[in-house]
Amino acid sequence: MSELIEVLTKDGSYSLRSVFFQENFHSLLGALEETKIKFTAPSDLQRFKGKSLDVLDICFGLGYNSASLYNELIKQKSYLNWYALEIDKKPLEYSLRKKAFKKLWAPKVKRIFDSLYQNDCFEDQFFNCKILWGDAREKINVIPADNRFDLIYLDGFSPQKCPQVWTIEFLSKVTQKLNPQGYLITYTSSAAVRKTLRNLGLKIFTIKPNFNSRTSWSQGTVAIAKFDKKKLKSNFNFDKLSVMEEEHLLTKASIPYRDQDLNSCAEDIIRQRLDEQLLSNLLSTKKWREKWGMTKLASKS
Ligand SMILES: C[S@@+](CC[C@H](N)C(=O)[O-])C[C@H]1O[C@@H](n2cnc3c(N)ncnc32)[C@H](O)[C@@H]1O
């Protein structure tokens, strides 16, 4: 599964390309930039200054999202209970070898990564971290049932390449692990994923594009089970969906990925969805794209 090719992205940070999934781990615009804009900024980490939080990182990969999280939490002396799910150890092996990657973070981040690689865990006064190696669909069941997360990062390859981690069945398990006011954060603005999260009862928000991104209309999605306007301070990184994004959810693109027994292969999940799209009376996605002069959806490559 893991033939990996090194990729230098435009912000000078390194990433990988998976030959098996035929996709990059990060946007070519910048691995570090992607992490900061799509995961760290929407996390609103200042809320947890000097306090404790629970985080689940699904599809840990090279570990950019968690390294950036650790970095911020170290500075603000937060207490972290952290789980990660990842099928392949090779990307972490790469991060640990790559000086340019390690230089991006506080020295403690390297100690944590070393320990995750060697012992699958790390513990000190502030952090308690465990990584579970294997298929996320299975390993999510190993997380103690009563563990609820304030932040869940979902960073799988795009739904078309790795539908296994974007199905109704998997997302249902994931969202059950979210604290009522916790944030599920992902880079995808896929209508299928957004519609599934909404159907699972979550409020969904769009991660606003930054000024530099002329081509993309969203940087991803934040889903919150119980969005309380009074309790949750407004977050400048995400907003309610635009009319254009709402209309996207009325098209055939919103037909979900399904994996009834959580063990289907990608091809079967894609085929079943295509069959469902063929029979559907929903609006054509092509028409929606034409109406809004649309560019392609954000994918990793
Ligand atoms: C886009 S990359 C993640 C990038 C990562 N978050 C980072 O910061 O470097 C997707 C990751 O998902 C992992 N993956 C693919 N299928 C998986 C599955 N079924 N369960 C767990 N991990 C999976 C791949 O091995 C890869 O590391």
Image (cartoon, rainbow, N blue to C red):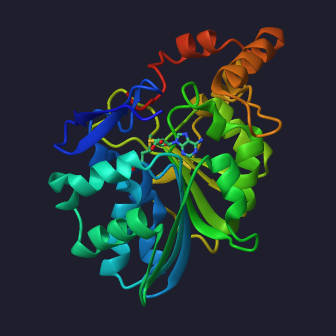
Residue drawn at the location 77% of the way across and 19% of the way down = 272
Q: Position of residue 274 (x, y in %)?
A: 72, 14
Q: Is residue 186 above or below residue 193?
A: below
Q: Which residue is more in the foreground, 208 or 59? A: 59
Q: Does residue 39 appear anywhere in the picture? A: yes
Q: Which of 250/54 is in front?
A: 54
Residue at the limit of the structure toward the front, as seen here: 118
The residue at the point 41 percent across, 61 percent down is 66
Residue 282 visible (yes or no): no
Q: Is residue 38 left or right of residue 15?
A: right
Name the image quarter holding the C terminus.
Answer: top left
**Left or right: where 125 falls relative to 231:** left
Q: Quadrant of residue 26?
A: top left
Using the image as rendered, state which of residue 291 and residue 148 is in the foreground. 148
Asked where in the image residue 295 lies, by quadrant, the reply is top left
Q: Quadrant of residue 175?
A: bottom right
Tally of numbered tags: 0
Residue 167 pos. (x, y %): 71, 37
Residue 259 image point, x, y percent: 77, 34
Percent of width and height locating residue 202: 72, 53
